[in-house]
Image (spheres, helix red, strand yellow):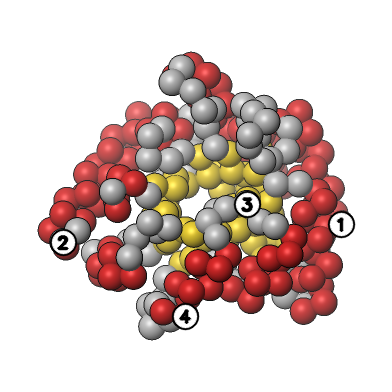
């Protein structure tokens, strides 16, 4: 994909985000995380050059490889994939700007142990299984606030910044909206605890997510094909 095509795709995405943002509120701010798992190193460099700063990877090994190959660029790296416990140390070494997929108290406690050993902190989002789908990771919406507060109390090396969800896996827009609204309600209740990031929405549903209050979206295929 050439630079001109990437510029066009980025401009179109920004325009669509802008329209959705204004439908929510003219004061609402949305950040774009470019999901780069199918992108080449050259494409990431081009998109960075065009002004995109935050990039997300879903595999720890790929994140580490990207960091090494693109270490000349001050990219804001996000980890957005499911984390296996045997990869915790690798993720800590990669030290992403934000980890989106903290999906249980058990994982938080395992991470806390390793983070404490190295005396470093990591900013994370609590992943919520808002549509209660067996195929998805994340805490049950009914337990989310309680789990969030337990992590805050028992894991001092994890800095919780808010919540993340993946919209309901269906073509029914009302069901997708419901999953986003469920997550936003939890986020809204956690603002008094310092939560400031609500990561919802991907290439196929980001506009609806923004209308429901998302202030961070994770978009890959619209940018990289």
How far is the residue under mark 4 from the one under mark 3?
21 Å
Label 1 secondary element: helix
Q: Residue at horizontal 77%, vertical 78%? A: 119
Q: Which of marks 4 and 1 is nearer the N terminus?
A: 4
Decide which of 89, 215 is in the foreground and name it: 89
Label 3 secondary element: loop
Does the image show residue 89?
yes
Q: Mark 3 points at which residue?
A: 82
**Looking at the image, is mark 1 or mark 2 nearer the viewer?**
2
How far is the residue under mark 4 from the one under mark 2?
24 Å
Label 2 secondary element: loop
Q: Name the residue under label 4.
A: 68
Q: Name the residue under label 2.
A: 2
Return the x and y of residue 178 as percentages of the image width and height: 55, 21
Q: Which residue lies most toward the bottom here?
A: 72
Q: Which of marks 4 and 2 is nearer the N terminus?
A: 2
Q: Name the residue under label 1.
A: 154
How far is the residue under mark 4 from the one under mark 1?
33 Å
> Compared with residue 30, is residue 145 higher up or lower down, i.e. above or below?
above
How far is the residue under mark 1 from the one under mark 2?
48 Å
Q: Residues within 10 Å of mark 1 (few under 14, many from 20)?
A: few
Q: Residue 47 carries which label?
A: none
Return the x and y of residue 159 as percentages of the image width and height: 70, 60
Q: Are marks 4 and 2 in contact (CB under 8 Å)?
A: no
Does the image show residue 177?
no
Q: Residue at horizontal 19%, vertical 58%? A: 1
């Amino acid at each position: 994909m050439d630079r001109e095509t990437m510029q066009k795709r980025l401009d179109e995405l920004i325009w669509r985000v802008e329209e959705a943002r204004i439908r929510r509120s003219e004061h609402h701010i949305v950040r774009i995380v470019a999901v780069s798992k199918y992108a080449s190193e050259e494409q990431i460099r081009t998109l960075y050059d065009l002004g995109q700063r935050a990039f997300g990877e879903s595999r720890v090994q790929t994140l580490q490889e990207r960091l090494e190959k693109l270490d000349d660029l001050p990219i804001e790296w996000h980890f957005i994939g499911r984390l296996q416990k045997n990869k915790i140390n690798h993720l800590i070494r990669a030290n992403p700007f934000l980890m989106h997929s903290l999906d249980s108290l058990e994982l938080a406690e395992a991470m806390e142990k390793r983070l404490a050993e190295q005396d470093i902190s990591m900013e994370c989002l609590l992943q919520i299984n808002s549509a209660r789908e067996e195929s998805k990771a994340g805490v049950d919406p009914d337990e989310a606030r309680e789990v969030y507060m337990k992590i805050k109390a028992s894991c001092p090396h994890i800095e919780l910044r808010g919540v993340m969800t993946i919209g309901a896996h269906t073509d029914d827009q009302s069901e997708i909206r419901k999953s986003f609204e469920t997550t936003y309600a939890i986020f809204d209740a956690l603002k008094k605890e310092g939560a400031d990031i609500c990561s919802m929405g991907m290439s196929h549903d980001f506009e609806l997510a923004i209308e429901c209050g998302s202030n961070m979206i994770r978009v890959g295929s619209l940018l990289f094909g």
